[in-house]
Each structure stands twice: as structure tokens, then as C-alpha cells.
Image (cartoon, rainbow, N blue to C red):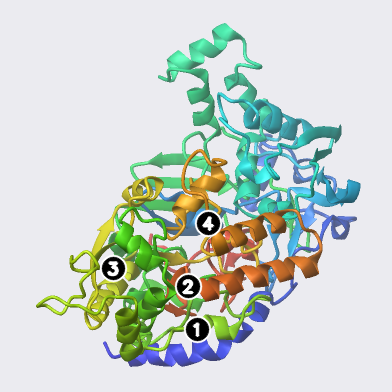
Amino acid sequence: MTDSVFRGSRRKFLQVSAAAAASAASGATLGFVGPAAAQGMKYSEAPELAELVAAGQLPPVEERLPAEPVVVEPMNEIGEYGGTIRTGIIQNRGFQARSSWGPEPILRIARDSSTIIPNLAESWEYTNGGKTFVLHIRPIRFSDGAPLNAACFDFWWNHVNLKTALTPSPLSQFVVAGEVPEFEVVDDYTVQWTWSKPHANLPGLLAHWVGAQIPRWLPRHYLEQYHEDFAAADALAAKVDEEGFSTWDELFNNHSAAQYMMPFQHPEQPTLLPFRLRDPMELNTLVAERNPWYWKVDPEGQQLPYIGEIVVTNFESGDVRDAAIAAGQMNWVNTDTTFTNLPLYRENAERGNYEARLWLTSRGAEHTIMLNHEVKDPVLKALFNDIRFKRAVSHAIDRQLIADVVYLGFGVPSQVQMIPGSAWRNEDWVKKDTAYDPDTANALLDEVGLSERDGNGIRLRPDGAPLVMNMDFPVDDPGSTQVGELLIELMREVGITFNIRPIAREQVRTLLDNNDMEVGIWIADKCSDTMFPHSPEWHVPMNASGGWNAWGAAYAWWRETDGEKGIEPTGDVAKVIALFEEMQVTVDEDRRHEIGTEILRLNAENLWNIGDVGEVPIPVILGTNFRNYPEQGFTSYDWLGNYQYQIEQTYFEGGEWVGEQG
């Protein structure tokens, strides 16, 4: 294997990356035409569904579709029915396959990767000076034919979200300045929430994971049988006993469980996805089939999706999944692929009947190196809060070495700022303190009082102990391990020692929750304009229980628990939290831009995150005849994978993946 395989690819990638957004949005920019275009259409369906209709086992397509189905403009061309998406997840992480089946949030992000457009809701608006958010629900049907309406949202809000047995505290993303809103059913297809202050970020949240989480609780007609507010006590107790649970809420949670709207256990569980569960995840395989009640069509009136089924295989490790890719067993994998295996992917692509494309991500840097500013060790705490020490660490990092050794020559020196194309990107802040300069690093370390060294050249702390710091990160990210190993060597050159500890994510979570982490590494995603306004995880310590911010975990806990846990922030940390809180209630776009700019400026000045390299692409594995997907696109958590490209309008040319065997 020669490096020519990826050298040419790197040049091509750098040439096209600036135009990736335009390329990804080819065809209809938003990918959404709307119900008006469906008027007067003659509808058709997949042959398998037509056979069921002819056999009397399914109503005609005209009866299954809503009165005004959503018309989806294909990215490149009208597709053809048939074929199977074959994808894989690692250790039951369903999110790695979420874009293969949808998801279908309440609102959605358009194909341009930034615009918020309708989805399960056909429209929304603010009234009452921005204090009331009105949602107009699209009159569509679940996969079992039952209607979606305001009663479904009433069930979720009043009997799940406000039911302490199921939800100890209301969904925090609906809470503004500590206030839970007043919910109201306006009519059969309209609901609204009212606060004393505006909830400026709600559309963005409803187009992201919050909007993809709520739908699993919307099939009221199905879930009432498992809920104490509706089911007869004797019947409910019998179901609890029959299914081996101890309480009704355990039973309810089991039957409402889903991974980004896809049930993994109960085929009868209704969904609004393009696909519905056929075979539960057993023996590490799940199969989902075309949803006959799906509510979207193409411009010719053909009911979507084009593709007939999805087969999801659960692998024990990323290495095993990579081997399956190389063996030609997968035709759609684009989350948590291993960049260092790009040569492996490309060497086997022709034989495996797939392509290994390079897409952009939302990572401001591949990793954020975070010094815990409230670490329990008082000596380390003083150092970690000294900007000179943080600048020294940053200047001691040879980022070009990381790019060459870990990322095959891809990547440029970057702090954890916003990705290219962001309205908030500031090149000076991106490059600040990224120059590899051991002399400056040594001078700064001497200046902070670390001039003494032991016999091995390791600097001595003020208390006389060698300067050794534990660095923890998730073992399932190979890049973190490789970067960590390089950091050990680079830091030794300036007299610092890192003890790297790759551990399970659960152990990382425990360390963060107990403020026991000294230094952490995490993938620095969420640096897109899609996520930053409502979830600036690395730039603001705003999410404790579900976040991975190691530099400010103690502050995040203080914010999240109203001071019952954690440590009260002061100075610039308190400022960025206050700015974030202002962002939540500010609807004026000019002011929102000012707020975001100030948050990022304070980050640049304080260096709370130390980045490594940015603009590293991610390999995306697609069958060679998989169509209506961009050549260069975006994939990351910010877009729930890459759901903006609408899996329902993709297809296999010829009706089947060319790699199918037998």
C-alpha cells in the first residue's frame, strides 16, 4: 500500500470542501417541496405494497397517504423501488445507524445543513411577543394507520413529561429560566407552550435530538394500555407480571423505548419513520421494512421510501465492523468510521462494491484537550487556571505531526472554535496559540514557577512532586489514543508528563460526575451554526448530566442543580454562562450573533479548550450504485448523522445493491 491512495484524495478533498454545502444541496436546496405540490397527483406505491393491497391486506395507497402528502424533491433524480441498506453499529449504539431510517423530528434541518423547515409539524410561529410557541401538527398517520394529532402531544406532555413516575423532572429543553411552560391544546392539530420569557432556541431543538425523542411517546393509542392513568388496574398489573417487570412504569418505558424513533424490541410499536421494525434486535441483527403508511411522496406521486428494508448488524468492536466493510458486507456506514483505516477502506472498495467518500464534520478540532479548572488537586487547579500554563501546553503540541501521523496528512492546526462556513468563525481565534513552539512553551512554564526539574527532566510542582497528570478519554475512539500517545512524547520535551488512561465511556461519566478527572479528551464536535446556539457544549459549561465537558463539569453541575451540586462559577466562566442564558431568550438575530461572538472571544482568551487539528474529513461508506446522496456532504451529531439528506429519497440503481450475494 502506497500513500498515493490518500494523497490524491486529500488534494481533491481540500479543493472541494469549501463547496461541500452547495454540492450537498444539489437539486432542491431544501429537499422539501411541500403538500401543495401534491394536489391533483396520482399516487403509486412499491410493488410489494401493491400486492398486499390486491390481496386485501392493506388499504389503497390513496387512503394511506394524508390528504396532502409531503412532496420530497430527489437530490438528483427520481428513484426506483427495491434494495436493502446494510449497515452496522458497535456495541448496540443505535445512533450510529439513525440516518439509515430517518429520523423524523418534529421539525427538521434542510439539505443545506442549516435551515430549519417543517416536518411532523407543518408550521410553527411565535405569538405573544415571542413568549408563546405555536405548533401546527401535520395530519398524518402512524405505521399502524392511527392518526397523529394534538391529543398525542397532550398525552406526551401531561402523562409522560409531567408524570414523575416516568419523568422525574420535565424535559429541561422546554424549561426557560427555571420555568416550566403552560401547555395548551388549541384545536385537533394545534398545540402551544407559553412562558414568561421567549424560548428562542426551541425550533432548533425540535429539529434536533429533542424533536426526534418526543415522537416515541406520541402513539397514545398504543401506549395507553401500559399507563396507569388509562389502563384498568387489574389488566395493567397482569401485563406487568406477564412481561416480567416489577412496576407499570418499567413496562411503559419498555414499550416506548426507541433509538432515534426506531423501536428495537417491539415490531407492533407504531412509528412515523420511513421504515418500521420487522425483526427485533436478536442475535445481533435487526431488520426494518418499508412503512406502508409513510406520509411522503416524490414529485411523480410515488410513495416513499424507495428502498425496501434495512438490515442493522451489531458488532462487538469497530475493528470487526471495519473488517465487515472491507469484506463487502456493508453498503451504508457513516458514523464512527475509523479515519486511520481509510487506506483499508479504499484498498477493498472495488472488490467490496462500495465507495469510501470523504465528508465534512462539525468538529472545530478533532479533539478538545480539557484541563479541569476545578480539579481537586490544589496545585493542578492553580496551574490549570493560569493562562500561561494553558498556552504552554498548546505551544508544546506539534499539530502538523498529529495531522501526518494520525490523520494521513489531513487536518490543519485548530483551536476549538467554529467550523469553516460558520457565521461565527474567526480565523485569528482558530489559530491562536497553535504554533508549535517548544521554546515559548518552556519559557511560559518557567514563568509560572515550574523551573525546577528532577533527574529525568520532569518539571517539579511547587510541592516538590513531579508534574504528572492523568488524561482520561473513551477507549472506543482510536484517534484519542493515538493523539494521547503523541502528547506524551511532545509534553516530555517540555518537562510535563501525561498518564493516558483509555477507559469505558461509563467510567468517563463517573469521573466527570464526581469531579475526579484531571485532564480529559473528547471529540470536539457541535461546532456548527446548527448546534452552537442551543448546545455550545465545549464553549459553555451548560450540560452536566449528559455532557462531556471536562474543563467545566463542576460549573455545569452547579448550573444544572441550582447550586446544590458542583462549584459556583466566577469571572469569565460566569460571563459565558450568563451569555448563554441570554441567548436562550433572545429572538433578535443581530443580538444573538453578538452573544455568540462574545462567548467565542472569551473562549479564545481563556483557552478553556486546547484543540489539535481541524478540517479532518470522515470516511463515508456507500454502495457503488447507491444514489441521491451527495459526493461531499456533512455528517455529525449536529445533523443526527446526516438525516438532512433524507434517506427516503435515496435508492439503488437497478433496484438492488450490486454487492448482494445470492
Contact (Cβ within 8 Å) of mark 3 with mark 4: no
Question: Residue 585 placed where, x, y %?
Answer: 75, 53
Q: Are marks 1 and 3 in contact (CB under 8 Å)?
A: no
User: Residue 620 location, x and y as percent?
Assistant: 47, 71
Image: 256 above or below 138: above
Q: Give yes or no for contact between labels 2 and 1 (Cβ–Cβ under 8 Å).
A: yes
Is residue 476 something that shows in the picture?
A: no
**For mark 2, what is the residue?**
607
Report which residue position mark 4 lands on: 541
Which residue appears at 73% of the width and 54% of the height?
Answer: 203
Where is mark 1, residue-wise?
432
Residue 509: % across, % down = 38, 48
Along the line of sight, which residue is nearer the eye, 6 or 247? 247
Pointers 3 and 2 in contact (C-beta within 8 Å): no
The first of marks 1 and 3 along the sequence is 1
639 horizontally vs 280: left or right? right
**Three-letter amino acid code of the residue under disc 1:** Lys
Q: Amino acid at mark 4?
A: Pro
- Relative to residue 657, is residue 629 drawn left or right? right
Q: Residue furthest top?
A: 234
Q: Which quadrant of the figure contains the C terminus? A: bottom left
Q: Nearer the viewer, residue 458 or 556?
A: 458
Q: Could you tell me how far apart the alpha carbons at marks 3 and 4 are, in whole angstroms?
A: 25 Å
**Residue visible at 67% across and 40% down?**
178
Question: How far, Cα to Cα, is label 2 from label 4?
Answer: 14 Å
Question: Who comes first in sequence, dot 2 or dot 1?
Answer: 1
* Amino acid marked by disc 2: Leu
Q: Secondary structure beneath disc 2?
A: loop
Q: Is residue 43 above or below residue 412?
A: above
- Residue at screen point 79% across, 41% down: 195
